[in-house]
Image (tube, rainbow, N blue to C red):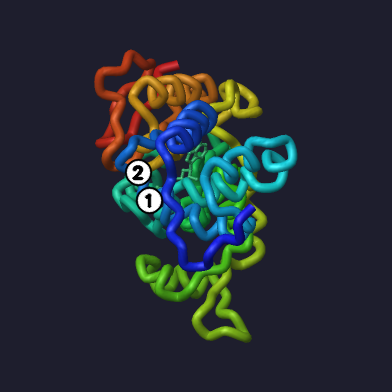
Amino acid sequence: MDAPSVNAFIRIDKDSFDRLSSYVTQEYGIKLPPVKKSMLESRLNKKIKSLGMNSYVEFLDYIFSDHGKQTELFHVIDLITTNKTDFFREPAHFSYLSGEFLPSYLAEHTNLKIWSAGCSTGEEPYTLTMVLEEFKKRNPVLNYSLLASDISLRVIQSAFSGIYTLDRLAAIPMEWKRNYFLRSKTNSNLARIKPQYRKKIQYKRINLMDTSFGLLKSDYDIIFCRNVLIYFDKPTQEEVIRKFCTHLRPGGLLFLGHSESIMGMKLPLTQVRPTVYQFNG
Ligand SMILES: C[S@@+](CC[C@H](N)C(=O)[O-])C[C@H]1O[C@@H](n2cnc3c(N)ncnc32)[C@H](O)[C@@H]1O
């Protein structure tokens, strides 16, 4: 093997691109059309060099070997996924949840099970925690449990730590920041979700392509799966949403991202707000 030059840019050849792209689409649902070639190169080249390799052929042979599957494939998924997220992203969803849906739903269901599927670095499940805790102050009968999942271990670990730079908290009202976060004593630019709220969330690595996600059926009142399916093709989106339906209680809600929709799909869901769907049961 030639020693890789630190500065050499490693191009992905067509066969390697096709091999990686088919694998990622089949296993994780994520589309990787040829326009994503340079994105892949910019994300993976550093990894390849750090392994002392200088071609994609060599790299893919390694990550798909028995050893590579156990030690490197997780890191490759971390690099391939897009994890952009924010606190209070698409705020209308949270206003609808606490202002309209929960007040009536709570008349019949006081123990809510909520799932943030594709939770990235935790901003979505922690926003839900804050919204639910505030609602609970006014409606103490509410009990809830929150599951947050993602395919990328790196983002799950980051979510679990609950640590954010202060600029990430800009969308959170000042009083809520005081109630739900602690400033770091050693780094004035960091804050961490208080332990009692961090502990409310169970984190799990779940691949949305898995047959039943390893979860009990008909168990969830609310599923958030926002800005995840956008990376899948239409038939795969429909398949995943159909599986979500088997995990929702009748009357429960599915929240999708702003550019996702179930238009053209035959599903037992009724739209109640833009990108918010109720399971008909
Ligand atoms: C853009 S982020 C969305 C985060 C958050 N839901 C939001 O709307 O702000 C998409 C997340 O979906 C995850 N993801 C992609 N494919 C997945 C799969 N097959 N199973 C589970 N999570 C997946 C990615 O790792 C990423 O963290």
Q: Which residue is mark 2?
A: 36
Task: Tell which of 22 and 134 is nearer to you.
Answer: 22
Q: Which residue is mark 1?
A: 39
Residue 241, placed above or below residue 165: above
The residue shown at (40%, 54%) is: 84
Task: Name the residue type under label 2.
Answer: Lys
Residue 265, placed above or below residue 203: above
Q: Is residue 125 visible?
A: yes
Quadrant showing the C terminus: top left
Could you tell me if the residues under marks 1 and 2 are in contact, i.e. CB atoms within 8 Å? yes
Instruction: From the top left corner, tell me how far across and down residue 83 is, in percent.
Output: 44, 52
Image position of 172 (left or right of 16) = left
Image position of 165 (left or right of 158) = left
Instruction: From the top left corner, tell me how far across and down residue 92 is, in percent.
Output: 29, 48
The residue shown at (60%, 56%) is: 2
Task: Name the residue type under label 1.
Answer: Met
Label 1, label 2: how far apart the Cα atoms are: 5 Å
